[in-house]
Image (cartoon, rainbow, N blue to C red):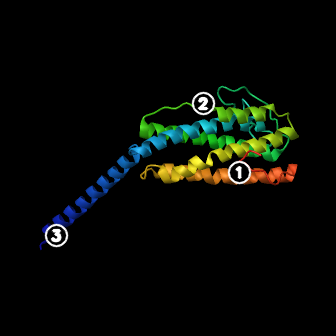
Amino acid sequence: MNRSLQGHSWYRRTHSWAIAVVLLATATATIADTPGRGRTAAFESNYLRFIINHHFSALRMSELAAGTDQVRDAAMSPNEGTAPTEGFPSTPSKSRLDEIKSMARMANRMQREEIATAQQMLRDWYNTEHRPAVTPDGQRLIDAVEAAPSGRAFDQAFLMNFSRHHYMALQPSLDCQVQRELEHDKLDRYCRGIVHAQVNEITEMRMMLCREFSLCDYQPSQGQ
């Protein structure tokens, strides 16, 4: 075969391969951007709305522990607060323990980002906007934390109710791992991340309840 024909053959193979790669990438992107099929679509829509509302009540609980600041300090410190959530008043920290304040700040940041991520998935896959709202269960937990006097009583109430709040997200997020749309790997990673983070924080809060209040048998699944 002469060189011109060899070159032409190489070009055709390379060009065909390049087109195949582009088509595969396009197909993959299309699959990732499409909604769930049948029952997976209903599950995902309901789960994403649930987790947005669930995390929204956690924002208020964590703000009561860490306090809220309109202007953030340049240097991080145990007294640094969180940004106040829309619809809730600014509040001073009710906790006496720097460890709880730190946990509350980190949880507040993480759950704000998880709300934004869930909202984006709803928009991308289901063309749906969902504004966070406090559910009756979330309001009961907020009320229990708000009612506790600042200091030691608040710290105990916060650890018990916030760990209970975390527990309430576990089963829906476990269900997400086996009931999501098969092509939605992003949602799978999202739900696995929630389970991992919530279990770790529940363990941390149970350890604080044991160390600070001698409540070493607290069961967040029962709220007692």
Residue corresponding to mark 3: 6
Q: Residue 171's spot in the image, x, y percent?
A: 60, 49
Discs 1/3, front: 1
Task: Please name the residue shown 26% across and 55% down the image.
Answer: 19
Choose the circle earlier in sequence order: 3 or 2: 3
Give the camera-side residue of 167 and 185: 167
Can residue 145 be spotted in the picture? Answer: yes
Q: Is residue 84 left or right of residue 214?
A: left
Q: Residue 176's spot in the image, x, y percent?
A: 52, 49
Q: Residues within 10 Å of mark 2 (few under 14, many from 20)?
A: some
Can residue 68 be spotted in the picture? Answer: no
Residue contact between numbered discs 1 and 3, judged by CB atoms under 8 Å? no
Q: CA distance from mark 2 to mark 1?
A: 23 Å
Task: Please name the residue shown 55% across and 30% down the image.
Answer: 131
Task: Please name the residue shown 78% across and 50% down the image.
Answer: 218
Q: Residues within 10 Å of mark 3 (few under 14, many from 20)?
A: few
Q: Identify the disc placed on residue 201.
A: 1
Residue corresponding to mark 2: 133
Q: Residue 102's spot in the image, x, y percent?
A: 76, 45
Q: Amino acid at mark 1?
A: Glu
Q: Amino acid at mark 3?
A: Gln
* Mark 3: secondary structure: helix
